[in-house]
Image: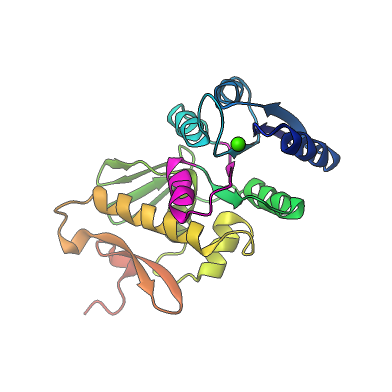
């Protein structure tokens, strides 16, 4: 596993590098945001750890730029800020998870393992279709009535999971396991933000869509979530 650590605190960077190398990772370190972004664009890293506060270019901008350039490797953000808003905006920028400083090294390892344990590759159909909603698992594209949904990797994985289990109520624990790879490594906040983002993007592509064709993620209180596709006749029970 080839990892890039973008961290300007030299002592922390050194100790993380040593620890991660002992765990079998190949580790490159960049000491500022600009250098980090250049390295991440130039090399095919398996995973990135990006500090929020960096000289020359802040971590959030680095993540945004990498995602805009089409880089899809998992990204873990480190933040010293306890402010929830900053964490949410890190996820919004395209990070997959965040870890507040100070953290235990064991926790960092657990987060990395969870990020790297991607959901199993789709061995079933390449194109999943429910009503007007279509998901191409090979191209990693989702469309509603031809309109493309601009999804982040975890939002896509979430939608794909819902599409593979139509009309099924899926619990948060199961989603954590299947989409994030580990129920103990995804915080409620991360899941909430991801579900919120997916809902928002589903709503964005269906303005004015008649209720009869609408697609939405329904909350089943105390149980979980269900993808509701009104226009998919095979999903309707007792349609009399
Ligand atoms: Ca810093």
Res 122 seen here: no
For the point 26% across and 41% down, which residue is it? Answer: 147
| Tally of numbered tags | 0
Residue farthest to the right, as pictured: 22
Is residue 181 visible from the viewing direction of this image?
A: yes
Query: What residue is at 28 percent from the left and 59 percent from the top?
Result: 215
Q: Position of residue 238 (x, y in %)?
A: 28, 80
Q: Position of residue 223 (x, y in %)?
A: 46, 77
Does residue 142 sit above or below 180 in this rendering? above
Image coordinates for residue 219, horizontal then vertical, percent = 37, 71
Residue nearer the viewer, 153 or 3: 3
Q: What quarter of the picture does the C terminus occupy?
A: bottom left
Q: As rendered, which of 152 and 226 lies closer to the eye?
A: 152
Residue segment shown in magenta: 73-94
Quarter of image, res 38: top right
Q: Residue 51 magenta-drawn?
A: no
Q: Residue at x 49, y 39 (%)?
A: 138
192 sits left or right of 237 in the view: right
| 171 vs 57, nearest the viewer | 57
Q: Residue at x 53, y 54 (%)?
A: 82
Residue 87 % position (x, y): 49, 50
Is residue 12 shown left or right of residue 42? right
From the image, which quarter does the N terminus lie in?
Answer: top right
- Which quadrant of the render holds ligand 1? top right
């Amino acid at each position: 596993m080839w990892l890039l650590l973008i961290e300007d605190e030299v002592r922390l960077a050194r100790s993380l590098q040593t620890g991660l190398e002992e765990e079998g990772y190949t580790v490159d370190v960049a000491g500022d945001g600009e250098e980090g972004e250049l390295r991440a664009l130039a090399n095919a890293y398996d995973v990135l750890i990006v500090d929020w506060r960096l000289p020359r270019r802040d971590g959030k901008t680095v993540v945004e730029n990498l995602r805009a350039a089409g880089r899809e490797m998992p990204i873990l953000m480190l933040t010293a800020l306890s402010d929830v808003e900053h964490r949410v905006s890190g996820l919004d920028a395209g990070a997959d998870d965040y870890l507040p400083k100070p953290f235990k090294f064991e926790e960092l390892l657990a987060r990395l393992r969870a990020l790297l344990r991607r959901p199993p590759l789709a061995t079933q159909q390449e194109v999943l279709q429910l009503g007007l909603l279509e998901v191409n698992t090979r191209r990693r594209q989702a469309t509603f009535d031809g309109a493309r949904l601009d999804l982040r990797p975890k939002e896509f994985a979430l939608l794909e999971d819902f599409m593979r289990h139509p009309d099924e109520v899926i619990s948060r624990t199961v989603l954590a396991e299947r989409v994030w790879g580990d129920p103990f490594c995804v915080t409620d906040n991360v899941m909430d933000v991801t579900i919120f983002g997916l809902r928002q993007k589903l709503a964005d592509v269906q303005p004015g869509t008649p209720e009869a064709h609408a697609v939405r993620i329904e909350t089943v209180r105390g149980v979980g979530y269900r993808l509701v596709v009104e226009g998919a006749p095979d999903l309707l029970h007792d349609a009399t």
